Amino acid sequence: MRFLGSLLVRRSWAVLAVTAVVLAVAALIGSSAESHLSTGGFTDPSWESSRALATLQSTFRTTQPNIVLLVTAKSGTVTDPVVAQAGANVARRLAGDPGVVDVTSFWSTPPQPSLASRDGRQALVTGRATGDENTTRATAERIAAGFDGSSGPVTVTAGGTAVAQAEIVSQSAADLHRAELITVPITGVLLVLLFGSAVGAMLPLVVGGVAIVGTLFLLRLLTGVTDVSIFALNVTTGMGLGLGVDYSLLIVSRYREELRAGRARERALMRTLQTAGRTVLFSAVTVAIALASLAVFPIAFLRSFAYAGVGVVALAALGAVVVLPAVLHILGPRIEMGRLPSRGGGDGRFWYRRAHAVMRHPVLVAVGVVVILAVMGSPFLRISLGDDDERILPPTAAARVVGDALRSNFADNPSSRLAVVAAQAAGADASAVRSYALLLSAVPNVARVDAAAGHFAGGRQVAPADATAAVFTAPGATWLAVTPAVDPISPAGVDLAKAVRSTPAPFPVLVGGSAATLLDSRDSMLGHLPIAITVIVVATVLLLFLMVGAVLVPLKTLVLNVLSLSATFGALVFVFQDGHLSGLLGFTSTGTISIRTPVLLFCFAFGLSMDYEVFLISRIKEEYDRIGNNEEAVALGLQHTGRLVTSAALLISIVFLAFLTSGVTTIKVLGLGLALAVLVDAFLVRATLVPALMRLLGDRNWWAPRSLRRLHLLVGIWEREPLAILDVGSPVRLDHTRD
């Protein structure tokens, strides 16, 4: 870091010139990233559910529809001749679209009575948009625009999964722009207040700009080789600006501190990089590893956040230790231009006194905070995992309107059926298929089974085979459609998928459909989560040990992070699963939390928690090495970092809370979850619980066995090499007051 500081002092203008050119190219290429991002990526091709649907399409030339047109009679019923004629015309128009196949409707020949509503005023026209994701999205957008509103005696509304995904893309893009319009002026004002000058307030935007523009460039490149989720954009913006504020605060504050200590500008910059710069790099590595753990999951959606998260963290750190110091050196005293009048208290005495106040009653404070976190986290014990559907969209969205109608007015949702596919059923006669269909129809929560042998419900045949039987057969193969009587993307749907898979079959079968996909997703998450947690835990312990050379600090950090995250998850269950605040926040509760949300929030929130922990502990350790007094070191560490940590938490929480204005519930969950995580961690954990526990542990905070202490002295990170290995149990005191 000393060498880097020396280089930046000599080549500041060159560094900024190269940065400007690189950013210009990155902005040019990255500006098109949004149009190449994916709305899917929630499944793994190796899952049984994925293989079932792939077989259904390749062998039977059919699959579950992703386009659903809701046709509503303005008067009368869907069987009235004039309405029937209009409905048939709608079906013909849809079939005429070159991107749509497998069109069927209530008015098809033979008739499809299951596609009519209970009250007889609505009916469905279904089809499947073909092609890759971009082609499917274009087709869905075209269908939604062409079938929207009045069509003679009927009104038509387009829905289905393809239309829902297209609407999520457009809604997310609009929400991102709106969130930026909200957060930019608010954070601008707060940055001026926080940095104390207009020029200083611009510095986090430099770091955030490097992170955001660079990450968009990386995401655009990645879209050429893999799927990247559209939701990664929101995280890129939020994390980029948030980390820009975090890292800039740390660097600028330390730089000003060194200048106030009487050091020349060049020496102050190098000293800043040796201390705050080193802390930024440690923080970036820990946060990046936490986010990189998402890459162990075989789901493109989660991997997208790993790509975006690692990219934005690495680039924010690069901007903070390379670009920002170059700007600081060029600005020099001009960083104070537009300086606000001093209000006093800028020396952190408030946090110094607060630390001592906490440490006077450490047991009472620790117990009180733990109780608060436990109460907040208690709802997490009854979390119910499900999946997202069109209900994450606003009630006025077309796909949401169609989905609500299917749930309330139709006995059958053609998109929710389980497909039981037997690609190797050669030799199986009609009686074998009939016996199997009877068994499936008797499974609890199965409403109906349709097969080549007829139609079944409640363990008996309710209708013989008809003209639809041909749909269920292919040479040497057959499949059965199982209609659930429960919400397929709920715990009950998971239980149904398990029951269907466990029902004895006369031939090998694959079970697909939304309920089966949720089951596979759950099993995949649970199977890979221990790997992700192990990566995070090992990396956290190792990196913190390399930084402080102690055993208890990393272990304490892990325990506190779990407490903090539990409180956040409990709050999300209370709000989104239970539906509290649904009116205020404008979302529809489904009684579940998306199965991917806890994994995603765990990695992101854990990373942000480590960000603040590294800021605080690194300064406490620096003071402890200097004075050798644990209690005073804690107070001094909080004096220098308390304002930074809490101010950064407030600023980044504003960015995340702006996500609550989104019309997509998934974005709301991420926004509230991340905002709560950073606020709870900064105010309750780092600024309150950490000082109390460090007071209780005393010098034991810095203890390590002799073998580990020797290891740390050999491979650990120091501001300078120690001259000798001290006795076990004694603090390592380094004089940080000398250059």
Image (tube, rainbow, N blue to C red):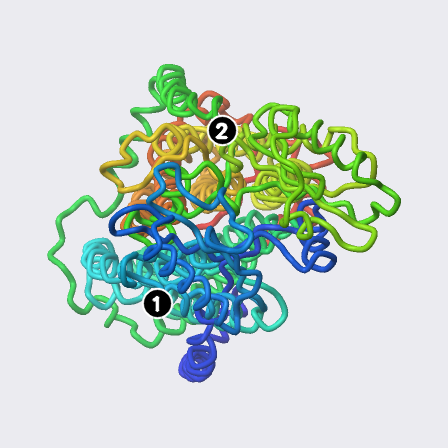
Question: Could you tell whether 211 is left or right of 728 in the image?
Answer: left
Left or right of 731 on screen, residue 438: right
Considering only order in the chain, which callout, 2 or 1, is on the residue closer to the N terminus?
Answer: 1
Mark 2, secondary structure of its residue: loop
**In front here: 582 or 396?**
396
Residue 542 in sight in this render: no
User: Quick one: which residue is furthest to the right in this view?
Assistant: 427
Q: Which of 579 and 189 is in front in this view?
A: 579
Q: Residue 65 carries which label?
A: none
Mark 1 burial class by Cα count in 10 Å: few <14, some 14-19, many 20+: few
Which residue reaches farthest front? Answer: 81
Q: How far apart are the two marked residues, 1 and 2, measured between alpha carbons?
A: 36 Å
Q: What's the residue at 71%, 45% (across, down)?
A: 479
Give the residue type that dot 1 points to: Ala
Query: x, y (%) of residue 231?
Result: 45, 56
Q: Which amino acid does label 2 sit on?
A: Ser
Residue at the extreme left = 341
The label nearer to you, 1 versus 2, is 1
Query: Which percent across, then down, holds residue 39?
Result: 49, 59
**Quarter-of-image position of residue 553:** top right
Q: In this view, does 243 lie to the left or right of 610?
A: left
Point out residue 614 in the picture as x, y percentages from the top left corner: 48, 45
The disc placed on residue 145 is: 1
Which numbered dot is residue 384? 2
- Residue 549 on image: x %, y %: 61, 40
Callout 1: helix, strand or loop? helix
Q: Residues within 10 Å of mark 2 (few under 14, many from 20)?
A: some
Q: Residue at x 36, y 53 (%)?
A: 71
Find residue 212 and report its image quarter: bottom left
- Judging depth in this view, the residue of 269 and 49 nearest the camera is 49
